[in-house]
Image: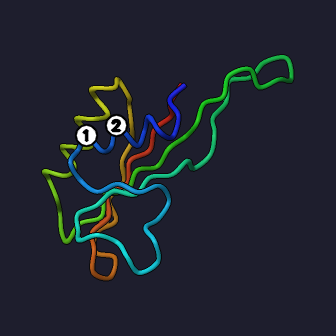
Amino acid sequence: MMERKDVFAMLKSTGMPVAYRQWAPAKPPPLPYVVFFQSGRNDAYADNSNYAKVPRWCVELYSEGKNDDGEAAIERALSENQITYSTNETGDQGGYFLVAYYFDTI
């Protein structure tokens, strides 16, 4: 199972600053940066028992505008780790552009 430290290391390979859940209050680095968190689990189960924990992760890329290089770096890191993902783009969010990636790890 890929743990939080493994997801962190994978995302650090993008060359962008990375934090779990949030940056210290009022101290985020300059854009672009990455925030990630476990958004739940999609466990495998049978016979009334969860037999395999499957964490569901969300990775958020914050940038000043559409950041093709940042997106490519995240997608490359996910692909190199054989992780399939879905993505959602929210556009301008009051001074930043947000692209989120969602994936499960075993």
Task: Determine whether, in the image, residue 71 is placed left or right of residue 49.
Answer: left
For the point 27% across and 69% down, the residue is 97
For the point 74% across and 20% down, the residue is 51
Q: Quadrant of residue 79?
A: top left
Considering only vertical position in the picture, is 50 above or below 9?
above
| Mark 2 crowdedness (10 Å alpha carbons): few <14, some 14-19, many ≥20 | some
Q: Position of residue 59 (x, y in %)?
A: 40, 50
Query: For numbered disc 2, what is the local secondary structure?
Result: helix
Type of amino acid at the residue the image marks with label 2: Met
Q: Position of residue 71 (x, y in %)?
A: 22, 49
- Mark 2 — residue? 10
| Mark 1 crowdedness (10 Å alpha carbons): few <14, some 14-19, many ≥20 | some
For the point 28% across and 74% down, the residue is 96
Distance from the alpha carbon under mark 1 to that under mark 2:
5 Å
Considering only vertical position in the picture, is 98 above or below 48?
below
For the point 37% across and 76% down, the residue is 27
Task: Determine whether, in the image, residue 39 is placed left or right of residue 87.
Answer: right
* Residue lying farthest to the right in this orientation: 48
Considering only vertical position in the picture, is 32 above or below 5?
below
Front-most of residues 15 and 74: 15
Q: Quadrant of residue 56?
A: top right
- Mark 1 — residue? 13
- For the N terminus, give its image quadrant: top right
Disc 1 to disc 2: CB gap under 8 Å: yes
Label disc, if present, on residue 3 of the rendered structure = none
Considering only vertical position in the picture, is 44 above or below 78?
above
Query: For numbered disc 1, what is the local secondary structure?
Result: loop
Type of amino acid at the residue the image marks with label 1: Ser
Q: Position of residue 82 (x, y in %)?
A: 34, 23
